[in-house]
Amino acid sequence: MFKPKSALTAQSAVLLIVNGFGLNIDNIRFIKEPKASDYYTKVKDDAYYAKAFIIANLNGLEIPRDIDPNGKVTREQFAHWIFKAISKKGDYAWIEMYQTFKDEDKVTQGYMDSVQKLLIGKIASLDNGKFRPKDAITRSEAAVMLAKALSFVKNTQPVPPAQPEQPVSPLTEVKLTSEAYGSEALKVTVSAQAPHPGYGIEIANVAFKDKQAIVTYRIVKPDPAALYPQVITTVKASVYVSNAYTPVLGGEAQ
């Protein structure tokens, strides 16, 4: 029987979050099967909720190692676990502000950021200006917080991962030219501008496809122990191909 005003136990809280967010460990390969006792001192390996505790740990929910599965969960603990579950779903942009409330001095320091984020995101709320961090969270309070958290994840676009910066090539104005070489061949030349004469260029590969000769090049780097005049220098490399193919610049070889 669901008792909305009764305190939520740790086992129920972990099951609620793991199942609600669909957390799993499907993409982790183990040398041996993980057991709850590997991560917790009071969670029995054969308990029906043991797997949920394992999943919670490996998804970074930061459940205390000495958690009592039958013990009560405080509002600040549940808020912290909810925030960690949200973070597992994506990197979300949170408004940079500080939410003040009457009993903020009672929040455990390690939980404050999570509480702040949930208040800012309107996932958690205050009761007459108080968060009541040390109070046991009730089943109904937990259900509301979870529902709002899942709605947030569903309706909020995560920040896309930053793309790694592409290295800037020291060569500029790279171009390909060709000229007849005898009656059946072409001399194909790749040329570029280099910042000094220490750089060079060489043909890396010629791939023949659909009547095209796709030419890729490789940058020859300068000797780090040598000194070079800082003079823009033209560098070149050539290769010979059949005139049955049209030469095409394929870019720098990776």
Image (cartoon, rainbow, N blue to C red):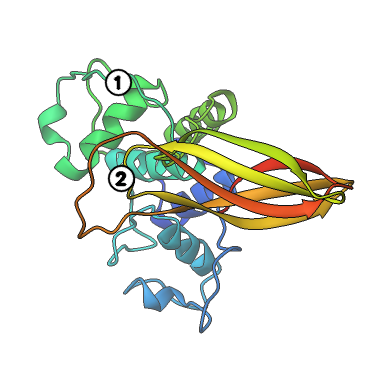
| Residue furthest front in the image | 182
Residue 189 image position (x, y, % from top left): 63, 44
Q: Indicate left or right for 200 with 176 as reference.
A: left
The residue tagged with tag 1: helix, strand or loop? loop
Q: Residues within 10 Å of mark 2 (few under 14, many from 20)?
A: many
Q: Indicate left or right for 88 with 226 as reference.
A: right
Q: Residue at x 33, y 45 (%)?
A: 197
| Residue furthest left in the image | 105
From the image, tell me which residue sits under label 1: 126
Q: Which residue is drawn at 67% across and 40% down?
A: 249
Q: Does residue 213 sit above or below 128 in this rendering? A: below
Locate the C terminus and report the quarter of the image it occupies: bottom right
User: In this figure, what is the number of numbered marks?
Assistant: 2
From the image, tell me which residue sits under label 2: 77
Q: Which residue is drawn at 52% across and 48% down?
A: 16
Residue 198 image position (x, y, % from top left): 32, 50
**Nearest to the observer: residue 82 or residue 156:** 156
Q: Can residue 175 be seen in this view?
A: yes
Q: How crowded is mark 1: few (under 14 residues within 10 Å), some or many (20 or more)?
A: few
**Nearest to the observer: residue 50 or residue 193:** 193
Q: Which numbered tag is attached to residue 153?
A: none
The amino acid beneath tag 2 is: Gln
Where residue 101 sits, quadrant-wise, is top left
The amino acid beneath tag 1 is: Leu
Residue 56 image position (x, y, % from top left): 45, 58
> Does the residue at mark 1 contact the one at mark 2 (Cβ under 8 Å)?
no
Where residue 41 sits, quadrant-wise, is bottom left
Q: Does residue 67 sit above or below 158 in this rendering? A: below
